Image: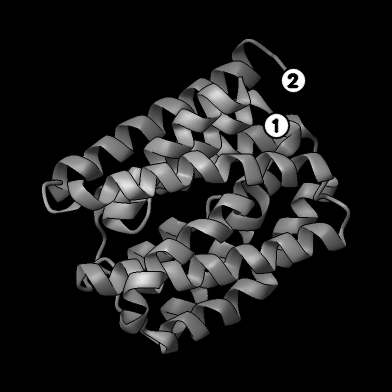
Amino acid sequence: MLLIVGGLAVFAGAVVQGGVGVGLGLVAVPVLTMIEPGLMPGAVQMVNLAMPLFTLASEWRRVEWRGVGFALLGRLPGSVIGALIIVYTSIYARSVFVAVMVVIAVLLTARAMSVPRTGVTLTSAGFVSGITGTATGIGGPPIALVYQSAEGPQIRATLAAFFCLSALQSLGILALVGELPVQAVAAGATLVVPMAIGFLASGPLRRYLDGGRARMAVLVVATASALSLIAQNVVIGLP
């Protein structure tokens, strides 16, 4: 189930993120949490660590390192809070938290709010990203919101650098608090394969993707996944 359904979700998320710079977590995390909640967020952080390397291989010159620095400065204390959420909450509570965070991220993305790109906003976005990224594996929307007015290559490259370093940070903290089982690492390593295929598929499609349609598809899939996750944990009451 993880390799088939989870792999398809990772593939779809990688196609979107390869084209617009963000989207893998929104699409894949709710699905993976429904399938194997005990392996999250470690498994998806392995994918989050690997995928940005593909983008950076071709667009690393477009990274805005100043912005990455401010964002990482805020992300460190946020990651500590995210780790505490994992340690002191049940898998059930974390699953609901994932769904709620996805819905909030979708609402923020759909509104397309204008946020100035300053040291304060970047550090604040990094802080929020640290909490949600470490606790759920979804840390992209706060940073993407700040960078939404930048050019496509700069968005993809800067987000890729931030995601790679952020995933490394989160994995280290999860391991430190004993919340990174070997099974999660193995599952994440396996999911790197469909992620790589999805990224490669995004290349030929990138120039044909209409930004509005791709963005709308991400929002619809993410919302459906989040609502399904809420139904599973709250209505049906499955663990």
Number of residue marks: 2
Amino acid type assigned to the residue bearing label 1 in the image: Pro
Residue 47: x and y in percent read: 56, 50
Q: CA distance from mark 1 to mark 2?
A: 9 Å
Image coordinates for residue 146, horizontal then vertical, percent = 34, 70
Secondary structure of residue under mark 2? loop
Q: What residue would you read off at disc 1?
A: 37
Mark 1 vs 2: CB contact within 8 A: yes
Camera-side residue: 200 or 2?
200
Residue 190 occupies which quadrant of the picture? top right
Q: In the rendered structure, which disc, 1 or 2, sits on the residue that comes first in sequence?
A: 1
Dot 2 surroundings within 10 Å: few (below 14), some, or many (20 or more)? few
| Residue drawn 47% across the image and 24% down it | 227
Colouring method of the image: one colour
On screen, 164 above or below 208?
Answer: below
Mark number, residue 137: none
Q: Is residue 211 above or below residue 121?
A: above
**150 with respect to 100 (left or right):** left
- Residue 113 locus on image (x, y percent): 26, 60
Label for residue 239?
A: 2
User: Residue sitting at 60 percent across and 17 percent down?
Assistant: 232
In the image, 149 versus 64, the foreground residue is: 64
Which residue is drawn at the image coordinates 41% and 71% (left, top)? 56
The N terminus sits in image quarter: top right
> In what element is the residue under mark 1?
helix
Three-letter code for the amino acid on which mark 2 is drawn: Pro
In the shown orientation, is residue 77 left or right of residue 68?
right
* Residue occupying image coordinates x 66% and y 74%: 76
**Residue 106 appearing in the image:** no
Dividing the image into 4 quarters, which one contains the C terminus?
A: top right
Residue 11 appears at what percent x and percent y?
Answer: 42, 37
> Viewer-nearest of labels 1 and 2?
1
